[in-house]
Image (tube, grey):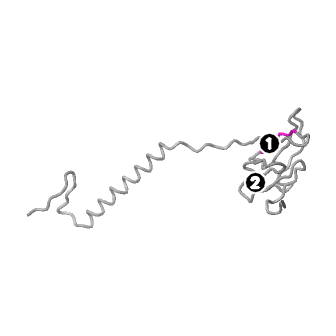
Amino acid sequence: MPRRHAAGMRRYPLLPRTLRRLDRRLRLVGTFLAAAALVGLVAPPQAEQPPKQLVRWTADGHDWLLVADRQQDSISAYDAHDGRPLGTIDRADGLADVDRLVLEGRWLVVLGDAQPQVVRLPGLRPQPLASVSR
Protein backbone atom coordinates (compact mmCIF):
# COMPACT_ATOMS: atom_id res chain seq x y z
CA MET A 1 0.00 0.00 0.00
CA PRO A 2 1.50 3.39 -0.95
CA ARG A 3 2.38 5.83 1.78
CA ARG A 4 0.04 8.83 1.99
CA HIS A 5 1.29 12.41 2.35
CA ALA A 6 -0.51 15.49 3.58
CA ALA A 7 -1.78 17.96 1.01
CA GLY A 8 0.81 20.48 -0.04
CA MET A 9 3.76 18.40 1.22
CA ARG A 10 6.62 17.97 -1.20
CA ARG A 11 7.61 14.48 -2.18
CA TYR A 12 11.07 13.70 -3.31
CA PRO A 13 11.02 9.99 -4.02
CA LEU A 14 14.32 10.09 -5.90
CA LEU A 15 16.29 12.26 -3.42
CA PRO A 16 18.11 10.67 -0.52
CA ARG A 17 16.67 11.18 2.94
CA THR A 18 19.49 13.56 4.02
CA LEU A 19 18.67 15.96 1.18
CA ARG A 20 15.00 15.94 2.13
CA ARG A 21 15.94 16.86 5.73
CA LEU A 22 18.22 19.61 4.42
CA ASP A 23 15.34 21.02 2.37
CA ARG A 24 13.10 21.16 5.48
CA ARG A 25 15.83 22.86 7.51
CA LEU A 26 16.48 25.44 4.80
CA ARG A 27 12.77 26.30 4.70
CA LEU A 28 12.77 26.70 8.48
CA VAL A 29 15.82 28.99 8.37
CA GLY A 30 14.24 31.03 5.57
CA THR A 31 11.04 31.46 7.56
CA PHE A 32 13.01 32.55 10.63
CA LEU A 33 15.07 35.10 8.66
CA ALA A 34 11.93 36.51 7.01
CA ALA A 35 10.25 36.90 10.41
CA ALA A 36 13.34 38.60 11.88
CA ALA A 37 13.48 41.04 8.96
CA LEU A 38 9.79 41.81 9.35
CA VAL A 39 10.20 42.52 13.07
CA GLY A 40 13.13 44.82 12.28
CA LEU A 41 11.00 46.80 9.85
CA VAL A 42 7.90 47.01 12.04
CA ALA A 43 9.55 47.76 15.42
CA PRO A 44 9.81 51.47 16.26
CA PRO A 45 13.33 52.93 16.45
CA GLN A 46 14.87 53.59 19.86
CA ALA A 47 14.37 57.16 21.04
CA GLU A 48 17.59 59.08 21.52
CA GLN A 49 18.17 60.82 24.80
CA PRO A 50 18.57 64.58 24.49
CA PRO A 51 22.16 65.80 24.83
CA LYS A 52 21.29 67.97 27.85
CA GLN A 53 19.10 67.49 30.91
CA LEU A 54 17.73 70.27 33.12
CA VAL A 55 17.01 69.93 36.85
CA ARG A 56 15.78 72.69 39.17
CA TRP A 57 16.93 72.72 42.79
CA THR A 58 15.46 75.06 45.42
CA ALA A 59 16.42 74.94 49.10
CA ASP A 60 17.74 77.27 51.80
CA GLY A 61 17.28 80.41 49.70
CA HIS A 62 18.93 78.87 46.61
CA ASP A 63 17.08 78.57 43.32
CA TRP A 64 19.34 76.86 40.80
CA LEU A 65 19.05 75.33 37.39
CA LEU A 66 21.43 72.39 36.96
CA VAL A 67 22.23 71.46 33.37
CA ALA A 68 23.83 68.09 32.62
CA ASP A 69 25.75 68.01 29.33
CA ARG A 70 26.12 64.38 28.19
CA GLN A 71 28.57 65.19 25.41
CA GLN A 72 30.97 67.14 27.63
CA ASP A 73 30.29 65.05 30.79
CA SER A 74 29.79 68.16 32.88
CA ILE A 75 27.18 69.78 35.10
CA SER A 76 26.66 73.54 35.06
CA ALA A 77 24.74 75.47 37.73
CA TYR A 78 22.86 78.67 36.92
CA ASP A 79 20.81 81.07 39.02
CA ALA A 80 17.15 80.39 38.15
CA HIS A 81 16.15 84.07 38.55
CA ASP A 82 18.66 85.87 36.37
CA GLY A 83 20.48 83.04 34.52
CA ARG A 84 23.99 83.93 35.66
CA PRO A 85 26.42 80.99 35.80
CA LEU A 86 27.31 79.84 39.30
CA GLY A 87 29.78 77.07 38.58
CA THR A 88 30.64 74.00 36.54
CA ILE A 89 31.93 70.59 37.53
CA ASP A 90 33.41 68.13 35.07
CA ARG A 91 36.05 65.39 34.78
CA ALA A 92 38.76 67.72 36.10
CA ASP A 93 36.75 67.94 39.34
CA GLY A 94 36.37 64.15 39.61
CA LEU A 95 33.03 63.76 37.85
CA ALA A 96 32.56 60.55 35.83
CA ASP A 97 30.22 59.93 32.88
CA VAL A 98 27.04 62.00 32.98
CA ASP A 99 23.94 60.40 31.44
CA ARG A 100 21.17 61.32 33.84
CA LEU A 101 20.59 63.40 36.98
CA VAL A 102 18.36 62.43 39.90
CA LEU A 103 17.65 64.99 42.62
CA GLU A 104 17.29 63.69 46.19
CA GLY A 105 17.11 66.52 48.74
CA ARG A 106 20.60 68.06 49.00
CA TRP A 107 22.10 65.23 46.93
CA LEU A 108 22.33 65.21 43.16
CA VAL A 109 22.85 61.63 41.99
CA VAL A 110 24.75 61.41 38.70
CA LEU A 111 24.12 58.25 36.70
CA GLY A 112 26.36 57.19 33.84
CA ASP A 113 28.44 54.32 32.50
CA ALA A 114 30.55 54.19 35.64
CA GLN A 115 29.44 53.80 39.27
CA PRO A 116 26.82 56.37 40.37
CA GLN A 117 28.22 59.49 42.00
CA VAL A 118 26.64 62.11 44.22
CA VAL A 119 27.15 65.85 44.25
CA ARG A 120 26.49 67.69 47.49
CA LEU A 121 24.43 70.82 46.95
CA PRO A 122 25.16 73.72 47.21
CA GLY A 123 28.89 72.86 47.44
CA LEU A 124 29.03 71.20 43.99
CA ARG A 125 31.62 68.62 45.06
CA PRO A 126 31.29 65.15 43.49
CA GLN A 127 32.06 62.02 45.48
CA PRO A 128 31.49 58.28 44.96
CA LEU A 129 28.18 56.91 46.20
CA ALA A 130 29.96 54.40 48.50
CA SER A 131 31.63 57.16 50.54
CA VAL A 132 28.38 58.99 51.36
CA SER A 133 27.55 58.59 55.05
CA ARG A 134 23.97 58.96 56.12
Residue 74 vs residue 108, the one in the foreground: 108
Amino acid at dot 1: Val
**Mark in the foreground, 2 or 1:** 1
The residue under label 2 is 97
Residue designated by label 1: 67
Q: Residues within 10 Å of mark 2 (few under 14, many from 20)?
A: many
Residue 118 at x, y percent in the picture: 81, 54
Q: Is residue 70 magenta?
A: no
Q: Which residue is nearer to you in this view: 25 or 55?
A: 55
Q: Residue 68 is drawn in which quadrant?
A: top right
Residue 110 at x, y percent in the picture: 77, 52
Residue 67 painted magenta: yes
Reply above or below: 45 against 19: above
Query: Residue at 74% of width from left, 47% of height from top?
Result: 70
Number of marks present in the image shown: 2
Q: Amino acid at mark 2?
A: Asp
Q: CA distance from mark 2 to mark 1?
A: 14 Å
Q: What stretch of residues is rendered in magenta?
A: 63-68
Question: At which x and y percent is residue 77?
Answer: 85, 42
Q: Residue at x 84, y 58 (%)?
A: 127
Q: Secondary structure at mark 1?
A: strand
Residue displayed at 41% across by 52% down: 33
Dominant SS type (magenta): strand
